[in-house]
């Protein structure tokens, strides 16, 4: 169960304590996150909502290890990631986090197969094993017959499914989704949400999703609101 | 090896830009190969000149003769172990464009002076026995299709009239660096038919027993003939060849300057292309870093791309140049040793690789230092 009051007994997959992120712009101090606490257990599907500039994406970046907090700690599956830097943090990210972006961010000159292969190039897997993983991931997202297609030959919904396959192919500890349906029509958005739900229900993945869309948030187990740098639980 | 696919697809991303960048390398390396070939053609004589051979010529000018009697007097000088002589003939075979040097030589001593030439004993014997015989270098024989037994007519320019020679042999060289673009015939034949060359030769070669004594021996030679009607200038064959090349100007400086400008321009062109290419892919690089590609991997990817341009273009350029030089001397005889050596080809490709790495380094470092959050905010 998601908690935002720092009272979890310590068995949460993701533990955030007193997380603060402050930016300096033109000599002005901007507090994006202020003393945020959060506990997320394995296999949960959590949605973050909030107005623009509330710090949702910043929180996602911090949880994914692509940005560093001003203070506070983030512990994922026992690893304190705020004390990691450089190559160690990069390696941790490769092993534990799958990213899904609003604009899919596929490499346009690579086929679906090659895009999904990217995270596996960082592992020691043989070519044959990589192939098995890629085929499984693309089949899971329903694109087993589109492996050799380039992104330009796919619809928006299909592109996002390739992005999801890329995110799950290396079996990361959790997935971070930044507005995964923000660029899709309702039908395609529902397909993506169905897929994310399946990953949680059938494959016990942990998903943290930032969204503006209440319909998307409805699919999550918990919805947390961020406002003025503070996290408020709105549904659990 | 795992990143080769990424490098390959990136090269195919903007085909025209890739083609032009590779072409820049190809043209530059072709030019580099050509410059090295010309440099070699000019300086090979200097490089391979025998360290134990001294050239003795008339002090006034190379075209002024020396008495044939100097042969014995040279042999009397301490340190000189062997002496031979030759004269410039300057005949025209069919057309003036068919230039190649022809020397009237002393058949009794010349062969021993130049052991770098591979000569068949029987052919040499036939040559010595035939006053009108000649010995032809392999390069000339191949170029004009001369065979043993052919009779070759020349139009004399210094020595007037028509001169005919019987090809008695063809000589090769023990290495690619020795010049087989030469034609030898008997000095006795020249002396016999010439009205004004009797008792005179063009220049002497003297072998010295100890190359370390070259300065001392050349001084002794010139002193020996000082204040005579035929004063001499003696120098090692290497110094003589270097002096000959100097007449054309500072070839080395010209070649280095042109080569330097070409490679510097190439560095700027490729560097600019790589920067443009990386700037266009800021988002993709950020995605790769997000997925877990390390800074080192990003650096390698960009450098690998730049290297791929350099290697592909460099190899194409240098191989085209090799093909060009296989056609032989394009000047019709001015550059007889016209070839591109393998070590020069390797040096050219290495230079291209260095330029490729240099051009890719700054874009690679910028890509490596790219902050994911900033890059993502931009897109």
Image (cartoon, grey):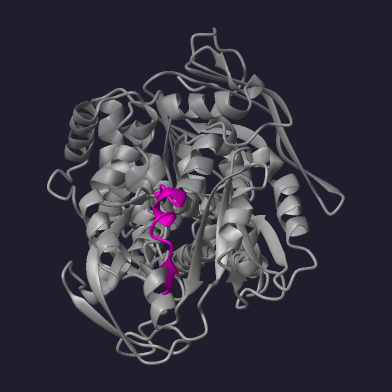
- Residue in the picture at 75% in, 51% down: B220
Picture coordinates of residue A55 (x, y %)?
A: 63, 43
Picture coordinates of residue B357 (x, y %)?
A: 55, 49
Q: Can residue B333 be seen in this view?
A: no
Picture coordinates of residue B177 (x, y %)?
A: 43, 54
Please report the bounds of the magenta region as a residue range.
Answer: B101-116
Q: Is residue B273 visible?
A: yes
Membership of A127 in magenta stretch:
no
What is the residue that sits farthest to the left in this orientation?
Answer: A145
Picture coordinates of residue A227 (x, y %)?
A: 64, 42
- Residue in the picture at 54% in, 7% down: A9
Total marks placed: 0
Q: Nearer the viewer, residue B187 or B241?
A: B187
What is the residue that sits farthest to the right in this orientation?
Answer: A27
- Residue in the picture at 45% in, 47% down: B304
- Viewed as shown, does residue B367 lie left or right of A180? right
Q: Which of B320 and A193 is in front in this view?
A: B320
- Name the quadrant of the C terminus of chain A: top left
Task: Using the image, determine if residue B11 lies above or below residue B115.
Answer: below
Membership of B114 in magenta stretch:
yes
Q: Which of B242 and B194 is in front in this view?
A: B194
Q: Which of B214 and B16 is in front in this view?
A: B214
- Name the quadrant of the N terminus of chain A: top left
Task: Using the image, determine if residue B295 lies above or below residue A91.
Answer: below
Q: Quadrant of residue B124?
A: bottom left
- Residue in the picture at 16% in, 50% down: A146
- Viewed as shown, does residue B341 lie left or right of B219? left
Q: In which quarter of the image is residue B46?
A: bottom right
């Amino acid at each position: 169960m998601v908690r935002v009051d720092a009272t979890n007994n310590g068995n949460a997959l993701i533990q955030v304590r007193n997380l603060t992120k402050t930016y300096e712009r033109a000599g002005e101090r901007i507090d994006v996150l202020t003393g945020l606490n959060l506990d997320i257990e394995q296999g949960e599907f959590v949605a973050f909502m909030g107005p623009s500039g509330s710090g949702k994406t910043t929180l996602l970046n911090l949880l994914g290890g692509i940005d560093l907090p001003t203070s506070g700690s983030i512990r994922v599956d026992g690893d304190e990631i705020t004390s990691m830097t450089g190559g160690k943090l990069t390696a941790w990210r490769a092993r534990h986090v799958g990213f899904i972006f609003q604009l899919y961010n596929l490499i346009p000159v690579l086929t679906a197969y090659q895009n999904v292969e990217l995270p596996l190039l960082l592992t020691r897997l043989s070519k044959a094993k990589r192939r098995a993983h890629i085929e499984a991931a693309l089949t899971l997202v329903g694109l087993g017959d589109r492996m050799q297609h380039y992104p330009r030959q796919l619809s928006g919904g299909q592109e996002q499914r390739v992005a999801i396959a890329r995110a799950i192919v290396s079996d990361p500890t959790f997935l971070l989704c930044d507005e995964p349906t923000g660029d899709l029509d309702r039908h395609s958005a529902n397909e993506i949400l169905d897929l994310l739900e399946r990953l949680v229900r059938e494959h016990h993945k942990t998903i943290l999703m930032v969204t503006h869309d209440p319909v998307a948030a409805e699919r999550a187990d918990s919805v947390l609101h961020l406002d003025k740098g503070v996290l408020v639980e709105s549904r659990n | 090896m795992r990143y080769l696919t990424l490098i390959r697809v990136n090269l195919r991303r903007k085909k025209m830009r890739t083609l032009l960048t590779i072409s820049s390398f190809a043209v530059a390396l072709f030019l580099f190969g050509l410059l090295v070939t010309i440099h070699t053609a000019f300086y090979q004589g200097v490089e391979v000149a025998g360290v134990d051979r001294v050239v003795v010529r008339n002090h006034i000018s190379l075209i002024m003769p020396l008495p044939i009697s100097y042969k014995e007097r040279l042999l009397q000088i301490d340190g000189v172990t062997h002496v031979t002589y030759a004269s410039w003939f300057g005949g025209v075979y069919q057309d003036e464009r068919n230039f190649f040097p022809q020397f009237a030589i002393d058949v009794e001593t010349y062969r021993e002076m130049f052991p770098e030439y591979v000569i068949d004993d029987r052919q040499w014997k036939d040559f010595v026995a035939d006053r009108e015989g000649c010995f032809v270098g392999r390069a000339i024989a191949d170029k004009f299709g001369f065979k043993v037994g052919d009779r070759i007519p020349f139009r004399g320019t210094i020595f007037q009239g028509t001169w005919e020679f019987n090809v008695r042999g063809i000589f090769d060289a023990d290495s690619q660096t020795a010049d087989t673009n030469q034609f030898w015939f008997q000095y006795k034949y020249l002396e016999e038919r010439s009205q004004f060359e009797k008792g005179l030769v063009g220049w002497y070669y003297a072998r010295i027993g100890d190359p370390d004594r070259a300065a001392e021996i050349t001084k002794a030679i010139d002193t020996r003939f000082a204040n005579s009607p035929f004063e001499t200038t003696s120098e090692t064959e290497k110094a003589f060849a270097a002096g000959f090349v100097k007449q054309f100007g500072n070839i080395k400086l010209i070649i280095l300057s042109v080569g330097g400008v070409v490679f510097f321009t190439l560095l700027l062109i490729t560097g600019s292309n790589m920067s443009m290419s990386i700037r266009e892919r800021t988002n993709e690089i950020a995605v790769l870093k997000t997925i877990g590609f390390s800074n080192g991997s990003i650096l390698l990817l960009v450098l690998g791309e730049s290297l791929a341009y350099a290697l592909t273009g460099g190899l194409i350029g240098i191989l085209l140049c090799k093909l060009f030089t296989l056609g032989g001397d394009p000047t019709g005889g001015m550059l007889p040793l016209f070839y591109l050596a393998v070590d020069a080809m390797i040096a050219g490709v290495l230079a291209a690789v260095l330029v490729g790495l240099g051009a890719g380094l700054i874009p690679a470092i910028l890509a490596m230092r790219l902050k994911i959050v900033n890059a993502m905010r931009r897109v």
